Image: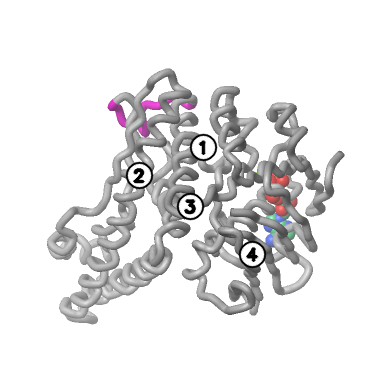
Amino acid sequence: MLLRRLQLRNHRNYAHLDISLEPGVNVFIGANGQGKTNLLEAVAMLALSASPRARRDEELVGPVAPASRIEAEVESAGRRMELTIALAVDGTRAHRTIDVDGARRRAVDLPGHFRVTLFWPDDLGLIKAGPEQRRRFLNQLLVQVEPGYARALSGLRRILEQRNSLLKRIAAGEDAPDVLEVWNAELVRVGSEVAAARAEAVRELAPDAARCHSEIAAGERLEIEYLGPPEDLAAAVHNSLADDLRRGSTGIGPHRDDLRVLLDGQDARGYASQGQQRTAVVSLKLAEAELVARRSGERPVLLLDDVLSELDLERRGALLRQVGNGGQVVITSVDVGPFPPDLIAGASVWSVEAGQVLPCG
Ligand SMILES: Nc1ncnc2c1ncn2[C@@H]1O[C@H](COP(=O)(O)OP(=O)(O)O)[C@@H](O)[C@H]1O
Ligand SMILES: [Mg+2]
């Protein structure tokens, strides 16, 4: 998988950008607030179709015009493709349009054309953060490798909205309970699909993550376990009706999932030190890249946003060994300090300043 060329127009603090990237290592150096994360966010959007951090598309549009555009030439299995994500702000809402080789696509159909593994500072809190962040980890991986997963996720979101609003109406006496039946059935159908994909992904991630963790942490045992919905989802949804009505929300389903991380048999969330958490997160991210490579037959583009400076030599080394794996890598940093000199010597290096990117040296 290769990102050949990236063009941005009015994306966050980029008025205009047009760069061609190298197949190997691309390093972007810049002080804080210059646009390094904004750049990787744009690249990640091409893989995920939505920003991995923005809550609203409107945030992404820069000050120049009521529209923005991310355009890329990517190469997958030797085939070149043009991907475009355009945002147009109309009043307070942004409309997103997506094209693949000039043909309009729905947002759920973009993932899978271009694949990345993104690792940014937020991920360092993955272990101790709430379950939503761990579900996002699984979702970002699965939309890229599991056909139909993005569609199922967006279906699930719609089902929950509908079901929750009906629960409130029923509780208020405005609807009869039997209006829920069709939504219960949909929740069970789509929920089982999402849960099965997550369960399989976690089974696949586990051995790679464990191997990587044990190499960095002198034999410490990392186990991950998918905490999904009850096996008999239909019965569980049925049995939770009274609770759901009281709360006005759906208590059972993959929107409540979590990923349990164990270190030497103990729940990492409760007791892991900062160092152990970081090792576990690096290991999960590397396992993610392996899974994507195995399932798709190509290495994803590795996006490392400002994480090298946060890691000690050993964890940095584990991450950078991936760089020698032949895949394309895009790394940002405030300076070249954390990079081995031979890596910088073989890389194409850019400077990022106030939304301008220039080749360095
Ligand atoms: N929609 C937007 N329009 C213009 N500037 C933006 C927008 N969103 C964020 N920015 C600016 O982008 C800069 C942050 O860029 P970022 O990529 O996070 O920096 P860093 O190089 O530290 O990773 C800030 O100066 C912020 O004000
Ligand atoms: Mg940043």
Kindly check if marks 2 and 4 are in contact, taking CB atoms under 8 A apart as contact.
no
**Measured from the top left, where is residue 225 in percent x and y?**
29, 40
Q: Is residue 83 left or right of residue 256?
A: right
Q: Is residue 38 above or below residue 345?
A: below
Give me the disc on residue 124: 1
State whether label 4 is within 8 Å of ligand 1.
no
Residue 80's tag is 4
Q: Earlier in the sequence, mark 2 or mark 4?
A: 4
Q: For mark 1, does the 10 Å Cα neighbourhood hold few (<14), some (14 to 19), or many (20 or more) residues? A: many
Specify the quadrant of the image occupied by residue 339. top right
Seen as rendered, the residue at the extreme front is 78
The magenta-colored residue range is: 265-274
| Residue situated in front as seen by the camera: 320 or 85 | 320
Q: Which element carries disc 1, helix, strand or loop? A: helix
Residue 295 shown left or right of residue 118 in the figure: left
Residue positioned most to the top: 218
Q: Residues within 10 Å of mark 4 (few under 14, many from 20)?
A: some
Q: Nearer the viewer, mark 1 or mark 2?
A: 2
